[in-house]
């Protein structure tokens, strides 16, 4: 007798969905191939074009996950789809996350996966543009407590980084340029390190010649401030206005200096 074993409903739905995702794989492989080739040849113009290709493919993936979720929020794979979409968009304005989560049926929200997703979304919503920045109180390099609230009255950027984070440290020259230009006008930076070893943290500060306030509780990714801000990947940063409201998030490259040029006209 021949035996045929079929997957669950969720398994079959995922297989069908991943088949549609495979249509984008060729574009993704091509974009990354262009990036690595350009990087190997130190071709800055080609690197930027490849980055744009990668961003375009990522946007297509995001739309695919969102469209599949919206097609049937009652689907057994809906929580998975929304979880991935949320992860893809954490560095963007997250104000629609709660609206999307509300589309899930109560039965899905009550599952362990649904509760995990809710726990993931909650701190992200607290740090959306327009929200009051959560308080931070951590020791600086000398062991003296520093509070974010003490910086009220001026623009301050909260930067999450670590000595082991290459992309974080590549952003430091951009921060230094902005700080040197606007600190005399009141602009401040508080960098929160997700290091665990104080020596690694201090050596990186010295090597990168960082002149602004540095704090950490040396708990790594379990840093209390990182938990409050929903940080699960770095670099991340938040620009906070004199009233303590978040006015911008995840500024890269020249973004910080450009926005400060408008704020300090």
Image (tube, rainbow, N blue to C red):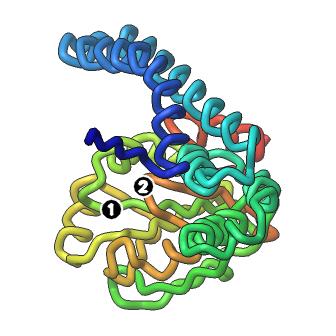
Q: Position of residue 21 (x, y in %)?
A: 49, 27
**In which image quadrant can residue 203 be found?**
bottom left
Q: Residue at x 47, y 32 (%)?
A: 18
Q: Residue at x 65, y 56 (%)?
A: 239
Query: How many angstroms separate mark 2 from mark 1 (CA)?
Result: 8 Å
Q: Residue at x 41, y 45 (%)?
A: 6
Earlier in the chain: of badge 2 and badge 1, it is 1
- Closest to the camera, between mark 2 and mark 1, is 2
Between 212 and 8, the one lying in front of the other is 8
Q: Which mark is residue 244?
A: none
Does residue 44 appear in the picture of this structure? Answer: no
Q: On the image, numbered disc 1 is attached to which residue?
A: 162
> In the image, is residue 183 above or below residue 116?
above
Q: On the image, numbered disc 2 is attached to which residue?
A: 234
Between 126 and 261, the one lying in front of the other is 126
Between 47 and 138, the one lying in front of the other is 47
- Residue 45 vs residue 101: left or right? left
Q: Position of residue 57 (x, y in %)?
A: 51, 22
The reply to whether discs 2 and 1 touch (Cβ–Cβ < 8 Å) is yes
Q: Position of residue 89 (x, y in %)?
A: 60, 45
Does residue 47 appear in the picture of this structure? Answer: yes
Crowding at label 2, few (<14), some or many (≥20) Cα neighbours within 10 Å? some
**In which image quadrant can residue 228 be found?**
bottom right
> In the image, is residue 138 above or below residue 263?
below
Crowding at label 1, few (<14), some or many (≥20) Cα neighbours within 10 Å? many
Q: Position of residue 149 (x, y in %)?
A: 68, 81
């Amino acid at each position: 007798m021949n035996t045929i074993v079929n997957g669950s409903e969720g398994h079959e739905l995922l297989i069908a969905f991943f088949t549609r995702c495979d249509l984008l794989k060729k574009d993704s492989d091509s974009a990354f191939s262009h990036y690595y080739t350009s990087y190997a040849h130190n071709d800055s113009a080609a690197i930027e074009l490849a980055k744009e290709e990668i961003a375009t493919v990522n946007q297509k993936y995001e739309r695919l996950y969102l469209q599949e979720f919206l097609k049937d929020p009652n689907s057994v794979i809906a929580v998975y789809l929304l979880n991935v979409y949320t992860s893809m968009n954490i560095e963007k304005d997250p104000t629609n996350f709660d609206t999307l989560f509300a589309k899930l049926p109560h039965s899905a929200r009550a599952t362990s996966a649904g509760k995990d997703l809710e726990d993931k979304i909650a701190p992200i919503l607290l740090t959306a543009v327009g929200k009051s920045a959560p308080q931070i109180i951590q020791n600086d390099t000398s062991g003296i407590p520093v509070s974010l609230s003490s910086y009220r009255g001026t623009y301050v950027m909260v930067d999450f980084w670590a000595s082991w984070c290459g992309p974080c440290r590549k952003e430091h020259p951009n921060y230094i340029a902005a700080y040197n230009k606007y600190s005399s006008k009141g602009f401040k930076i508080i960098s929160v390190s997700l290091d665990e070893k104080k020596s690694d943290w201090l050596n990186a500060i010295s090597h990168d010649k960082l002149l602004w306030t540095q704090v950490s509780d040396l708990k790594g990714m379990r840093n209390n401030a990182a938990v409050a801000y929903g940080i699960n990947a770095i670099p991340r940063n938040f620009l906070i206005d004199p009233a303590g409201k978040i006015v911008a998030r995840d500024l890269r490259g020249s973004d910080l200096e450009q926005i400060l040029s408008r704020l300090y006209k």
